[in-house]
Image (cartoon, rainbow, N blue to C red):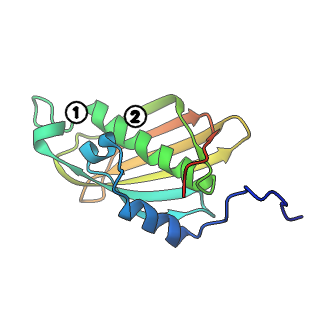
């Protein structure tokens, strides 16, 4: 049955969502700091692929490795954007909780992130994310829960 609501958002293709993210001039400052760039979107799989430019002057600890809190922020970004995509760009999903496991230290440079929604419910979403180094080695993995929250200003 089709919706008769005049204010219902028009469905967007994966390509339209990706183009919108890639051309935005209003990227959040946290995303800019992390060097976030959306690479691919799949509404069907409720997943995204992103890259991060981990800058040595911003993100490193005294051991010259990416500080773990920044890896957590990257994972949170992957999972949060996956929630937006899974909703068809009708919801944000603030993180309620997140668990991160670290497998190896990360070096500055290009990183690849994957975010996915495992289950999207009316009041809660379950998410997963991974961060890989330039050699394809898993650096960290997270699971999280988020609270889907409608928004109306996405155009």
Q: Secondary structure at mark 2?
A: strand
Q: Residue 110 — which label?
A: none
Q: Is residue 143 above or below residue 38?
A: above
> Residue drawn 56% across and 49% down?
153
User: Residue 50 appears at what percent x and percent y?
Assistant: 38, 57
Looking at the image, the residue that sits furthest to the right is 1
Q: Quadrant of residue 20?
A: bottom left
Q: Is residue 39 above or below residue 147?
A: below
Q: Secondary structure at mark 1?
A: loop
Disc 1 and disc 2: Cα gap in Å? Answer: 14 Å
Say whether residue 141 is left or right of residue 152: left
Q: Nearer the viewer, residue 151 or 149?
A: 151
User: Residue 145 appears at what percent x and percent y?
Assistant: 58, 34
> Residue drawn 26% across and 50% down?
35
Q: Residues within 10 Å of mark 1 (few under 14, many from 20)?
A: some
Quadrant location, the N terminus: bottom right
Residue at numbered disc 2: 101
Q: Nearer the viewer, residue 24 or 49?
A: 24
One can see residue 65 in this view: no
One can see residue 68 in this view: yes
User: Residue 53 appears at what percent x and percent y?
Assistant: 22, 52
User: Can you tell which of label 1 and label 2 is closer to the viewer?
Assistant: 1
> Residue drawn 73% across and 56% down?
8
Quadrant location, the C terminus: bottom right
Say whether residue 7 is left or right of residue 117: right
């Amino acid at each position: 049955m089709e919706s008769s609501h005049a204010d219902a958002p028009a469905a967007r293709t994966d390509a339209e969502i990706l183009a919108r993210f890639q051309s935005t001039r209003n990227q959040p400052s946290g995303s800019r700091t992390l060097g976030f760039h959306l690479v691919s979107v799949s509404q069907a799989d409720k997943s995204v692929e992103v890259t991060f430019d981990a800058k040595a002057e911003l993100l490193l600890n005294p051991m010259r490795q990416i500080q773990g809190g920044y890896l957590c922020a990257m994972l949170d970004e992957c999972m949060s954007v996956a929630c937006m995509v899974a909703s068809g760009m009708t919801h944000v999903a603030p993180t309620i909780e997140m668990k991160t496991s670290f497998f190896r230290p990360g070096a500055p440079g290009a990183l690849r992130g994957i975010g996915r929604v495992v289950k999207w419910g009316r009041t809660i979403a379950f998410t997963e994310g991974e961060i890989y180094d330039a050699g394809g080695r898993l650096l960290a993995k997270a699971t999280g829960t988020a609270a889907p929250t409608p928004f109306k200003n996405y155009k």
